[in-house]
Image: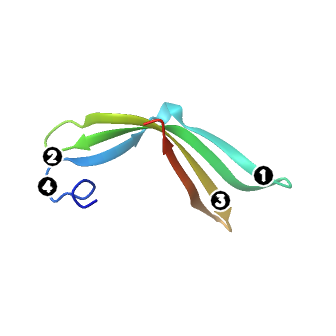
Amino acid sequence: TRQYICPEQGAKPIRKRDENSLEVFPLYKDGKLYGAIQNGVHRFYLRETGKEDVLTGTARFSHVWLLQGDQWKLSVVLSYDH
């Protein structure tokens, strides 16, 4: 992880969401909102200081968010179709 995600120098991987791909579906139980499913596409890049980001891959994602009190908590994260 240290070598690829947190390098001290060189290229660092980043992820950007395709804003046009985002879908959100509310989840209700007995008419009360309790969560949401978020689907979309994200793209992976390598970022290096002084250079343009280089696209290295694309994937789909799904997140399940749960409403706990007045705060949203990320419950499930899926990344697939790499």
Residue 53, horizontal then vertical, whole percent: 24, 37
Which residue corresponds to mark 4? 9
Which residue is pictured at 40% across the width and 34% down the height? 58
User: Where is residue 36 drawn, in percent x and y?
Assistant: 66, 50
Is label 2 in contact with label 4 (beta carbons under 8 Å)?
Answer: no
Q: Which mark is residue 49?
A: 2
Kindly indicate whether the residue at mark 3 contacts the one at mark 2 (C-beta within 8 angstroms).
no
Mark 4 to mark 1 CA distance (whole Å): 46 Å
Whether pointer 4 and pointer 1 mark residues with C-beta atoms closer than 8 Å, the reply is no
The circle on residue 28 is 1
The crowd level at tag 3 (other Cα within 10 Å; few <14, some 14-19, many 20+) is: some
Q: Residue at x 29, y 40 (%)?
A: 45
Q: Secondary structure at mark 4?
A: loop
First in sequence: mark 3 or mark 4? 4
In this image, 44 relative to 33: left or right? left
Q: Kindly identify which residue carries mark 3.
A: 66
Q: Secondary structure at mark 3?
A: strand
